[in-house]
Image: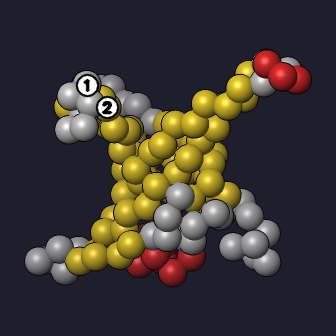
């Protein structure tokens, strides 16, 4: 048996969008920016990685009501990588998608 799980903490990049499949299954999508800082002073640099997050079924409906742009969030789930060619630069790129098992809002209620 094999299993993989990823945990990220970052800021929501866009409001959660809820949609329903033909069979009535709820799906919510949003993006999360995770930033890493290296160096000090003038040498301090920030690298941001974007994740697309998908939540299914009952959790999707709850997430759509709560998750807003700018909210700090913790997400756990399975990650998948999709390779593609960038249309403008004609360079290979990859996108990271998390199918969330759980999420937790970390921003105080006044900010969220």
Image spot of residue 107 (x, y percent): 74, 64
Neighbor class of circle 2 (other Cα within 10 Å; few <14, some 14-19, many 20+) is few
Helix, strand or loop under label 2: strand
Q: Where is the N terminus found, in terms of image quarters?
A: top left
Q: CA distance from mark 1 to mark 2?
A: 10 Å
Contact check, label 1 and label 2, Cβ < 8 Å? no
Counting every numbered tag in the picture gives 2
Q: Residue furthest left?
A: 22
Neighbor class of circle 1 (other Cα within 10 Å; few <14, some 14-19, many 20+) is few
At horizontal 67% and vertical 58% (from top left) the residue drawn is: 72
Of 95 and 79, the residue lying toward us: 95
At horizontal 23% and vertical 77% (from top left) the residue drawn is: 20
50 left or right of 84 in image: right
Residue behind mark 1: 91
Residue 74 appears in the rendering:
yes
Tell which tag, 1 or 2, sits nearer the viewer: 1
Helix, strand or loop under label 1: loop
Taking 87 as reference, is 63 above or below it? Answer: below
Residue behind mark 2: 94
The label shown at residue 53 is: none
Image spot of residue 62 (x, y percent): 48, 77
Taking 70 as reference, is 37 above or below it? Answer: above
Residue 89 falls in image quadrant: top left
């Amino acid at each position: 048996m094999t299993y993989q799980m990823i945990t990220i903490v970052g800021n929501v990049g866009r409001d959660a969008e809820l949609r329903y499949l033909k069979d009535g299954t709820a799906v919510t999508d949003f993006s999360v920016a995770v930033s890493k800082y290296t160096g000090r002073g003038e040498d301090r640099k920030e690298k941001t990685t974007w994740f697309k997050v998908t939540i299914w079924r009952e959790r999707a409906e709850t997430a759509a009501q709560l998750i807003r742009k700018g909210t700090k969030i913790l997400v756990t789930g399975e990650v998948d990588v999709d390779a593609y060619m960038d249309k403008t630069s004609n360079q290979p790129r990859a996108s990271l998608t998390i199918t969330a098992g759980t999420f937790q809002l970390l921003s105080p209620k006044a900010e969220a």
